[in-house]
Amino acid sequence: MRCEWADSEDMRDYHDKEWGKEVHDDRLLFEFLILEGAQAGLSWSTILKKREGYRKLFHNFDVKKVAKITSKQVEKLLLDPSIVRNRLKVESTITNAQFFMDVQKEFGSFDAYIWQFVGGKPKLNTFKSMKDIPATTKESDSMSKDLKDRGFRFVGSTICYAFMQATGMVNDHMVDCEFR
């Protein structure tokens, strides 16, 4: 048995291989931060289908390369259907890359910074039903506020909580999920 939201082949694959596993690699943390922000108002399934497009167009989430994307390049990105063609989301990817590097300089890594919101170790939840999972927590509220204070965009508390779930900062697999 697995969590009920994993209801298609791509969602099951994501659930089984990635979701909820601890991520400490800055490149992958940046990828999830951007993809979770891109999801705002959309389904995760839509973002998964566009993930390879994001990887290709955003230099496999190489934060230094993304931070240097020009406004002329943004116009080209907005024409490509392999990503979400929302100007604010595309532009925030670039500015978030710049702020991401600022955090790396300040803390030594984004990993060192972001994991402080859960005390450096995953929070294991014991939910029995999807309806029990909160959209936000005090930790995601705190993370969102701090990221926004640093200039990041598309980092509301709900997005931050989804990021925390995706990167294993919280384990929200249902108690009866075999992947827990």
Image: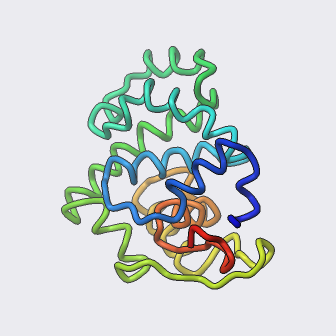
Name which quarter of the figure residue 175 lies in.
Answer: bottom right
Image position, residue 10 (x, y; %): 64, 42
- Asked whether 32 or 7 is in front, the reply is 7
Q: Which quarter of the image is occupied by the N terminus?
A: bottom right
Relative horizontal placement of residue 26, taking residue 72 as reference (left or right): left
Relative horizontal placement of residue 143, taking residue 39 as reference (left or right): left
- Asked whether 34 or 166 is in front, the reply is 166
Image position, residue 149 (x, y; %): 44, 63
For the point 46% across and 64% down, the residue is 21
Q: In this view, does 115 lie above or below 106?
A: below
For the point 27% across and 53% down, the residue is 102
Q: Which quarter of the image is occupied by the C terminus?
A: bottom right
Question: For the image shown, how many numbered marks are present on the structure?
Answer: 0
Image position, residue 76 (x, y; %): 51, 14
For the point 40% across and 49% down, the residue is 30
Q: How is the image coloured?
A: rainbow
For the point 58% across and 21% down, the residue is 78
Q: In this view, does 147 lie above or below 169?
A: above
Name which quarter of the figure residue 89 lies in.
Answer: top right
Image position, residue 123 (x, y; %): 49, 81
- Asked whether 121 or 77 is in front, the reply is 121
Residue closest to the far right:
131
